[in-house]
Amino acid sequence: MPQLNENFLKLEKNYLFINIAKKINAFKEKNPDADIIRMGIGDVTLPIAPVVIEAMKRGCDEMGAKETFRGYEDSGTGYDFLKDAISRYYASFGAEVKPSEIRINDGAKSDCGNIVDIFGNDNVVLITDPAYPVYVDSNLMCGRKIIYADSNEENGFAAMPDESVHADIIYLCSPNNPTGSVYTREQLEKWVAYAKKNNAVIIYDSAYEAFITDKEIPRSIFCIEGAKSCAIEMCSLSKTAGFTGMRCGYTVIPEELKFTASDGTEVSVAQLWGRRQGSKFNGVSYPVQCAAAAVFTDEGLAQIHENIAYYQENAHIIAETLNKLGVKFTGGVNSPYIWLKCPNNMKSWDFFDLLLEKIAVVGTPGAGFGKNGEGWFRLTAFGDRQRTIEAMKRLETLLA
Ligand code: PLP
């Protein structure tokens, strides 16, 4: 009989969004005519930019002709044309990343979850709480010790390092899912200094960097001096360019990132990850990489920014409503997420039930993202404009 990885049995039984779906279904059964507005799941709703779709079609046509057909990609790390484009994109906001340091993947979730493979299980893992659940789950799956840095109302949901605590692996996400908060340059400098002091690695999730409008806020950990010797960055085209259904992201592992193995030899993290991927991953489809490269052309960037601006305006509408109602929140600027404090000290799931039952609006209970999420609630700006306006009208009526 195979021995099971019983760490899986210790995971939360009900994944957050399954719970939400169950509640919605029960509500629909009782209220079949209810007009439900979903502001919960962080998926985009606008179609992909035309120039990106054209590039994908061209990629498909090439696959259908003998002269241009492509099978396995040699390196499995992504085509040079895409890595060059991403490298130039990084340069446009002040981060120096070489094409050879970039690895193309099928979205950030895979690498966020799989990166655990190249680190030992005795590491102390530090995760800011609340957090995108993948960081916690993937570490619990291999039985690791996790310590949490509290992101809360007092620190503006931007947890900072506790110098008296040691960590080996640190997960940071900015702009943050679920709280919408962003780290300033000074705050990131402190995290980098802490990582260096502890000889730790930062795993930096910048999936929402394209939503940053404030020029002072770094769009990459590599905008911070010294980060290349202590950080890995993961980013994605999912929210930047509507690729949630296309699947393409990228991970940056700098050449400088090296740690010492138990026998004293110096090991390059990029090489270790390359070895892991070489055995377990065969790359991203050619047409998708053609589409991804089109995102980073001048025309592509102009078109994706029209969609981002649409979501930003939704965020603005939500933020204005909350301001009017005197509800506290973070995010909404530099982020597609609005993280609000449940009125009257309600618990997250109680507020979820209230919104669903009274005004048929669905959000995400903050408690599902960690203990500091209790009493908070996430709304997303990824919905349709008119539906967002309608949801805010209903909220005003309910809370006024
Ligand atoms: N990181 C964060 C913080 C996210 O919120 C998400 C998706 O919601 C991802 C990574 C993964 O995105 P994808 O796998 O679609 O690239």
Image (tube, rainbow, N blue to C red):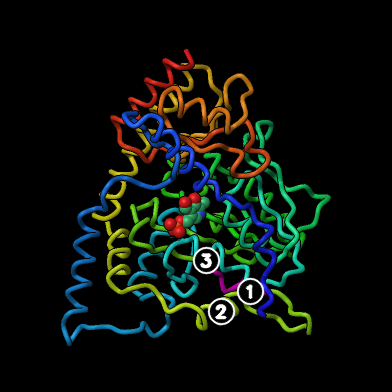
Residue 17 is labelled as: none
Q: Are marks 2 and 1 in contact (CB under 8 Å)?
A: yes
| Residue 373 is covered by the magenta coloring | no
Alpha carbons under labels 2 and 3: distance apart: 11 Å
For disc 3, the marked residue is 111
* Quadrant where the image shows the N terminus: bottom right
Please tell me whether residue 84 is drawn above or below residue 235 in the rendered image. below
Q: Judge the density around disc 2: few (<14), some (14-19), many (≥20) Cα neighbours within 10 Å.
A: some
Q: Is residue 372 above or below residue 219?
A: above
Q: Identify the amino acid type marked 1.
A: Ile
255 inside magenta stretch = yes
The residue tagged 2 is 276
Question: Mark 2 vs mark 1: which is more N-terminal?
Answer: 1
Seen as rendered, the residue at the extreme right is: 164
Q: Is mark 2 within 8 Å of ligand 1?
A: no
Residue toward you, 394 or 108: 394
Q: Earlier in the sequence, mark 3 or mark 1?
A: 3
Upstream in the sequence, badge 2 or badge 3? Answer: 3
| SS label for mark 1 | helix
Distance (Cα) linking label 3 and label 1: 11 Å
Q: Which SS class for mark 2?
A: helix
Which element carries disc 3, helix, strand or loop? helix
Disc sitting over residue 118 in the figure? 1
Dominant secondary-structure state across the stretch colored magenta: loop
Q: In the image, 287: left or right of 212?
A: left
Q: Residue furthest front?
A: 30
Give the residue drawn at x 73%, y 56%: 146
Q: Tell me which segment is drawn in magenta.
A: 252-258
Residue 70, image x, y percentages = 27, 83
